C-alpha cells in the first residue's frame, strides 16, 4: 500500500526541482525490498503503465533527502521514495461549483465532469475540496460520499463534523441493509440514488444482480470484476430511450460498490459510452492518465469522459429528519451527445 507523506517524513526539495512542484512520498514495505524503483512505482501509482512508471522514475524519483534515483536502483525495506512532479491540473480549474442545496449542515453541489474530489498526485489544486476551501476559507468541508473524477452530478458535502458523521452513518446503515436484501426494512431510512448513463447497446430493463470484487490480477489495481461469492451488488436499470445503437438508461443503486454501474452495464454487454476501463480497451485508462490516447482511442470512446451522471438523491436529512430530494439534470455534454444520435 502506498503511504502518503507524513509530517515526520518531510521530503527535502532537490536542487533544480521547480518551486511549484508537489511531492508524493511512498514507504517501501519490507516485502518490496530489492525491487527496482520503476517496478516499485508501477505497483504504487494507480492507472499508470510500467512504461510510464519508468519515465516517472527516470525524471522524478528521489530519496527522502533529495538524492536522485534511477529506474534500475533497488529499494530497501522502510525506505521512502519521493516523487516530485509539476501539478498537472493548474490550467483546468472549473469556473464554479453550482450549489443545488445548502443549509447549515450539508451542501449538495453539481460536480462537473473531469474534476477530482480530493487532491491526488495528478490533480493537486483543481479538486472539489480545494475549490470549496478557496471559496470559503476556514469553513469545514468533508465529502459524505464520492464519485469518480469523470462522473458528473450530485455530491454531498458535510459542513460540520457532526453532520458529516451523521450522514455517513445513515448511508452506511442503509447500505448494509440493502446488501442483505432488507430494502423494505421500515426501521431504516430510505435512500435512493439515481444515475443516468448512455450506453453502447440497449440493456434489458430490470435488476442486474452480480456480485463484485476488486480484480487482484489487473495491473491497474482499480478494476472490479464479477465473481461468484463476491460482494453483493445490485442495480435496477430502466431504459428511458433508444437512439440507434445507443440507450439512455436510469440506474437506481440498491448497493454502492466501486464502479458498480459501469461494470454491471458492461457485464450485460452494454458498456457506458466513453468508459476507458470497462469499454473497448482497459489499457485506455493508463494511456488517458498519461495523456497518450491516440486518435483511434478517441474515435472508439466517442466522448472524452464516460457518460455517467449522478442525477437524483433522495434521503432523510441526517440532522433534521426532513426529506432531502436533490436533482441534477443531464449536463450539456451528455445532452448534446444524446441529441445528436440518430433516432430509430
Image (cartoon, rainbow, N blue to C red):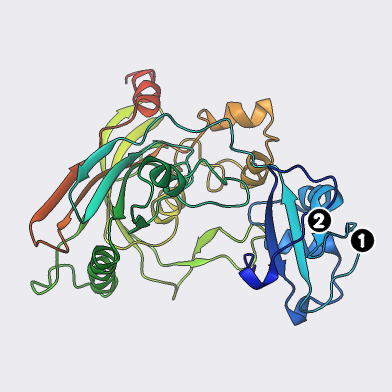
Between 158 and 185, the one nearer to me in the picture: 158
Q: Does 336 appear above or below 43?
A: above
Q: Under tag 2, what secondary structure?
A: strand
Q: Which residue is mark 1?
A: 72
- Horizontal side of residue 330 vs 187, given as left or right: right
Name the element at disc 1: loop
Between 34 and 279, the residue placed more toward the observer is: 34
Say how many tags the image has.
2
Residue tagged 2: 61
Q: Residue 213, can we see it?
A: yes
Q: Is residue 193 visible?
A: no
Q: Residue 322: where, in percent of width, then height? A: 7, 57
* Up-down relation of residue 88 to residue 344 (above or below): below
Q: Is residue 100 above or below residue 217?
A: above
In the figure, is residue 80 to the left or right of 289?
right
The quadrant where residue 161 appears: bottom left
Task: Kindly check if marks 1 and 2 are in contact, taking CB atoms under 8 A apart as contact.
Answer: no
Instruction: State the residue in front, 29 or 212.
Output: 29
Q: Position of residue 339 (x, y in %)?
A: 34, 20
Amino acid at each position: 500500500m502506498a503511504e502518503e507523506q507524513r509530517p515526520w517524513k518531510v521530503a527535502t526539495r532537490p536542487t533544480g526541482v521547480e518551486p511549484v512542484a508537489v511531492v508524493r512520498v511512498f514507504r517501501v514495505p519490507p516485502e518490496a525490498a530489492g525491487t527496482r524503483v520503476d517496478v516499485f512505482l508501477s505497483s504504487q501509482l494507480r492507472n499508470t503503465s510500467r512504461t510510464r512508471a519508468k519515465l516517472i522514475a527516470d525524471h522524478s524519483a528521489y530519496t527522502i533527502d533529495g538524492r536522485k534515483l534511477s529506474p534500475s536502483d533497488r529499494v530497501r525495506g522502510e525506505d521512502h521514495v519521493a516523487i516530485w512532479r509539476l501539478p498537472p491540473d493548474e490550467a483546468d480549474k472549473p469556473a464554479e461549483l453550482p450549489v443545488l442545496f445548502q443549509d447549515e449542515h450539508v451542501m449538495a453541489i453539481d460536480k462537473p465532469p473531469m474534476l477530482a474530489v480530493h487532491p491526488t498526485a495528478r490533480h493537486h489544486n483543481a479538486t472539489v475540496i480545494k475549490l470549496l476551501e478557496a471559496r470559503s476559507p476556514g469553513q469545514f468541508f468533508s465529502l459524505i460520499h464520492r464519485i469518480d473524477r469523470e462522473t458528473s452530478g450530485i455530491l454531498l458535502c458535510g459542513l460540520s463534523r457532526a453532520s458529516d458523521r451523521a450522514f455517513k452513518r445513515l448511508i452506511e446503515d442503509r447500505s448494509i441493509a440493502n446488501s442483505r436484501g432488507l430494502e423494505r426494512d421500515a426501521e431504516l431510512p430510505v435512500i435512493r440514488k439515481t444515475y443516468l448513463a448512455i450506453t453502447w447497446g440497449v440493456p434489458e430493463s430490470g435488476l442486474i444482480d452480480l456480485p463484485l470484487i476488486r480484480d487482484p490480477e489487473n495491473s491497474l489495481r482499480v478494476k472490479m470484476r464479477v465473481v461468484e461469492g463476491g460482494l453483493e451488488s445490485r442495480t435496477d436499470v430502466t431504459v428511458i430511450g433508444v437512439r440507434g445503437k445507443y440507450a439512455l438508461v436510469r440506474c437506481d443503486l440498491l448497493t454502492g460498490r466501486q464502479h458498480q454501474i459501469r461494470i454491471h452495464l458492461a457485464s450485460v454487454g452494454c458498456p457506458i459510452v466513453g468508459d476507458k476501463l470497462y469499454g473497448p480497451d482497459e489499457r485506455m485508462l493508463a494511456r488517458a492518465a498519461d495523456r497518450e490516447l491516440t486518435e483511434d482511442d478517441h474515435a472508439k470512446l466517442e466522448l472524452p469522459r464516460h457518460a455517467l451522471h449522478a442525477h437524483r438523491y433522495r434521503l432523510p436529512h441526517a440532522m433534521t429528519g426532513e426529506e432531502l430530494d436533490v436533482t441534477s439534470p443531464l449536463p450539456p455534454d451528455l445532452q448534446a451527445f444524446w441529441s445528436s444520435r440518430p433516432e430509430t
